[in-house]
Image: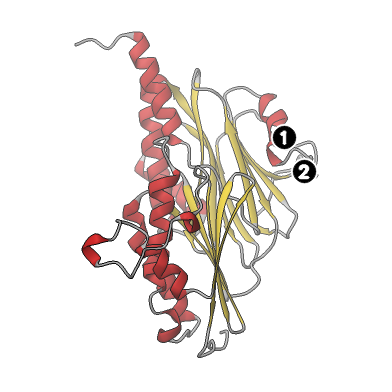
Amino acid sequence: MVLNASLLLELTHSMQRSLLPPRFPVRRDIEVESACTEPEGLVCFYDHVWLEAQVFAAAAVRLHDAGIEGAWNAAGLRQSLRALLNHESDPETVIGLLGKLAPTLRADIALMRLDLVSGAVSLACLGEAQIRRAGSREPQLAGAIVPGDILWLTAGQALPLAGGDIPVEGLEALIRPALAAGRENAGCAVHYKAAPKSKRSATFIVTNDLTGVPPLLEDLNRFFLRQALDDEDVAGLDVALDELITNAINYGYHDGNAHEILIEVNVEGDRLMIDIRDDGAPFDPLSIPEPDLSVELEERQIGGLGMYFVRSLLDKVEYRRSNGWNVVSLEKRLRHGAGSEE
C-alpha cells in the first residue's frame, strides 16, 4: 500500500498536535502560555512538565526536519527530554546527554528548570534558541527570578517580548505578537507569580486518565505524612478524593484530548483545605442526590453513596464554576492538630 500525500500530511498534523501538552491550569504561583507555528515547514513544539511537586520544567523546540520524519523525530525528542529531566537536575547536562544519545540530531532547544520555592532557575540552549526576561533583549543567565518576572523561551527567529507588563487580555496577548514576527518557531512564556507560602502547601497534577489516580493518592498520603497529620484525621480522605477526581474524569471530558486536573492542598492551623480544579464540562458533584438509606440495599437506586461518604467525612464541601473551571473546595478540621512545620 502506498501512502498518498494527503494521508502523510494528515498524519504529520496529527502527530504535531499530539506533541503539545494539555492546557496549563490556573494556579496562584505560576502561569504558562505557549504557542508554535502550524506544521507546514520545520517541526516546532513546546512542552512543560512537573518534575516534583514544586519543580517545573519548560522547553521550546524546533527541529530541522519537516513532514512525517520530523514529526517522528519530535515525538522521540520530547520523550527523551522528559526522561532526562527526571534524572538530571541541570539542563546543560541534559542537553549534553541528548547530544551523545542522538549525535545526528539537528534541533534548536530552549530548556528551563524552575524551583518555585526558591525561585532558582537553571537554563540551557542549543542552536538558534534563547531564554530572556520579558522586556530584555539580552539572554537570561541562570540564577534566580523574583515574583513578577516573565521568562520567554524561544526556538527559532522569534523576537523579544515588547515589555514585561501583561495586557488586560492576558499573557497570551503578550506573546503572540512576538511569535508572529518570526517564521517556523516555538515560544513558551513562564510568569513566576509568587513563591509557595510554606512547606504546608503543595500542588499536585493528574491527567484525565483513571490510571493516574492511584499514584496521585500515594503522593497525597506522603504529603500528609510530612505534615505529621494524625492517621485518624486523614482516614478516608483517599476514598473521598478518589470519588471526586474519578467523577471529574468520567463526567467532565468528552473531547478525547488530554487535560490536567489540579489539586491544591493547604494545612493552616487546625484546618486541612483542598481545592480540586478541572477544565471539563460544567459538573457539580453536589447535585448528585443522596441515597435513601432507609430503603433495603437491593431496592436502592445505583449511585450517590460515594458523594454521601464525601459529605459525611468533610466538614465543608463547596462547588463553584470559575473562569471555565470546575472548583470543588473541601475543608477538614484536624481534631488532633497538625505537627510542626519542618
Please say if 210 is above or below 110. Answer: below
Label 1 amino acid?
A: Ala
Q: Earlier in the sequence, mark 1 or mark 2?
A: 2
17 left or right, relative to 110: left
Identity of the residue drawn at 36% across and 49% down:
209
Which SS class for mark 1?
Answer: helix
Please say if 194 is above or below 166. Answer: below
38 left or right, relative to 207: right
The image quadrant that residue 199 belongs to is: bottom right
Q: Which residue is mark 2?
A: 166
Q: Position of residue 244 (x, y in %)?
A: 43, 59
Q: Which quarter of the rendered picture does the N terminus lie within?
A: top left
Q: Which mark is residue 173?
A: 1
The image quadrant that residue 87 belongs to is: bottom left
Q: Which mark is residue 256?
A: none
Q: Which quarter of the rendered picture does the C terminus lie within?
A: bottom right
293 left or right, relative to 271: left
Identity of the residue drawn at 37% across and 10% down:
6
Question: Mark 2: few, some, or many residues within 10 Å (few <14, many ≥20)?
Answer: some
Which SS class for mark 2?
Answer: loop
Disc 1, disc 2: CB below 8 Å?
yes
**Which residue ends up furthest to the left in the rendered image?**
1
